[in-house]
Amino acid sequence: MKSRVTTKQGDDGTSRTLAGEVLPKSHVLFECCGWIDSLRAHTALLRLELIEQQPEEFEDLSQFLLWVMHAYFLIGTACNDPLRTHPEYRKGEIGPDHLRRLEEEQERLEASLRLPKAFVVSATNRPAALADLTATVARALERQVVRLKEAEPGFEAAHILAFVNRLSDYFYVLARYLEEGRHHAVNYGVLEG
């Protein structure tokens, strides 16, 4: 039976963009799209952890994370075709409304917690650790979007960059929210003696 997934077209280390270009898989465009995939997978793992822990308590968070994961596909399409060669492939664009919804959710979480006054050295539970990990992947994606914008100056990435920048903030706040005020702050005293 022939695989419906394996095409063998990338066996030479290249891949085709939505615009139809064949580029090396190491190209900044594919690096960027790879980090979007990583962020989606980390977000999905965090969401599943919350659902398995306390499905009713985390229903609102679960639904919001599902919305965020759908936003990743808008980002992915834009990054895979940064010069809009095929706008017909786009199902929408990240814009001010997406950013507003993300900021409102972060503000909702922040309203009920006291943020630490020092760097956090470690999360205090598994869901918070997964949220911290997801924040680091969001920061890595942000760097890749910047690199893609540098490589393709015509890429209109302002809304995407703002959204991805806020994502790392959101996941940091989510981690602190999931810890319910119990933080392992940096304590340089542990390095002494």
Image (cartoon, grey):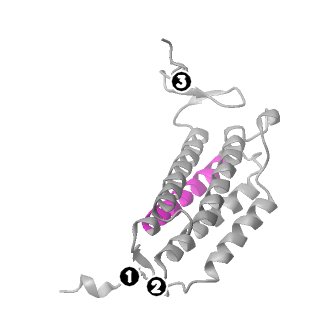
Q: Which residue is mark 3?
A: 5
Q: Quadrant of residue 186?
A: bottom left
Chain-order first, disc 3 or disc 1: 3
Q: Pinpoint residue 40: horizontal percent, then vertical percent.
A: 56, 49
Q: Which residues are magenta?
A: 129-150
* Residue at figure coordinates x 55%, y 86% from the top left: 114
Between 99 and 139, the residue placed more toward the observer is 99
Classed neighbour count for the residue bearing mark 2: other residues with Cα under 10 Å, few (<14), some (14–19), many (≥20) = few
Classed neighbour count for the residue bearing mark 3: other residues with Cα under 10 Å, few (<14), some (14–19), many (≥20) = few
- Three-letter code, disc 1: Val
Q: Secondary structure at mark 1?
A: loop
Q: Which residue is mark 1?
A: 186
**Mark 3 or 1: the one toward you:** 3
* Residue at figure coordinates x 66%, y 44% from the top left: 76
Q: Pinpoint residue 102: horizontal percent, then vertical percent.
A: 70, 65
Q: Pinpoint residue 132: horizontal percent, then vertical percent.
A: 48, 66
Residue 118: numbered disc: 2
